[in-house]
Image: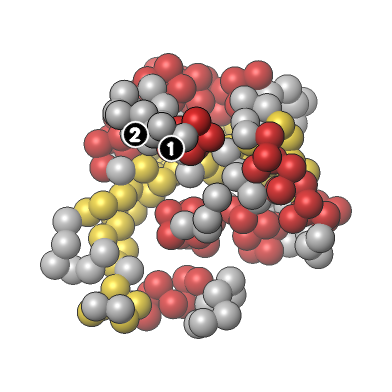
Amino acid sequence: MKINTDGVLLAAIVTQDNPEYSLDIGTGTGVIAMMLAQRFPKTVVDAVEIDESAANTAIDNFAGSKFAARTAAHLSPIASYQTARKYDLVVSNPPFFVNDLKNPEIRKGIARHADEEFFDSLLQKVSEILSPAGSFWLILPVKQAELMAESARQYGLSLQRRIEVCSDQSKPVIRHIICLSKNNHSSPASESFYIYESKGVHTTAYKELLKDFFLAF
């Protein structure tokens, strides 16, 4: 599973005041979880992954990192994940091709595809384990993000912030990064984020956001 732009953008852009416990849902090989551990030096990060091979790689990556004492990977679907913790920060770069053509490779299919029931169970679980002042951050295509924000209200979660991600200023929005919380927000904050300023040239905002993680910046 390659490191992708969606995942690193999400991990670098989320905000939360002094999270004690953080959770990465669908961690893959653990990149987002380790970025959270780097950004929030006092947080303990749990990471949940349904794919056994990826979860084992995340375990190895955590063990070999300087965040080993504060990171743990769990092989489990999020719906059946058991914990007594209340998380101050929950993040997920979930599968998003809802009811779309399934990838013929089973493992990639699990990582990239989901149906409505998955997102409902995700919201239900997060509503149970999120602390009262906690936040839940996701990155999704526009349509799925809008549906997620609408469905969240059924589980006591409301949209707090939306970041519209574009390749450049001439292109349409390709992703929404959304923040959900248990606080009711009648007017959620909305902003735009551009990855490129011209072909092959990243924006200053993108480089500033990721300079602590990418050696190229």
Residue 33, position as x, y percentages in the image? 65, 51
Which secondary structure lies at badge 2? loop
Across and down, in percent, residue 62 comes to 77, 54
* Secondary structure category for the residue under label 1: helix
- Please report whichever mark, 2 or 1, sits nearer to the chain's N-terminal start: 2
Q: Which residue is mark 1?
A: 112
Q: Residue drawn 29% across and 67% down? A: 194
Q: Badge 2: how crowded within 10 Å, few (<14), some, or many (20+)?
A: some
Horizontal relation, residue 132 to residue 179: left or right: right
Picture layout, residue 196 above or below residue 8: below
User: Residue at 32% across / 68% down in the picture?
Assistant: 195
Image: 206 above or below 38: below
Q: How far apart are the alpha carbons under marks 2 and 1? A: 6 Å
> Which residue is nearer to you in this view: 111 or 25?
111
Amino acid at dot 2: Phe
Identify whether 29 is placed above or below 125. below
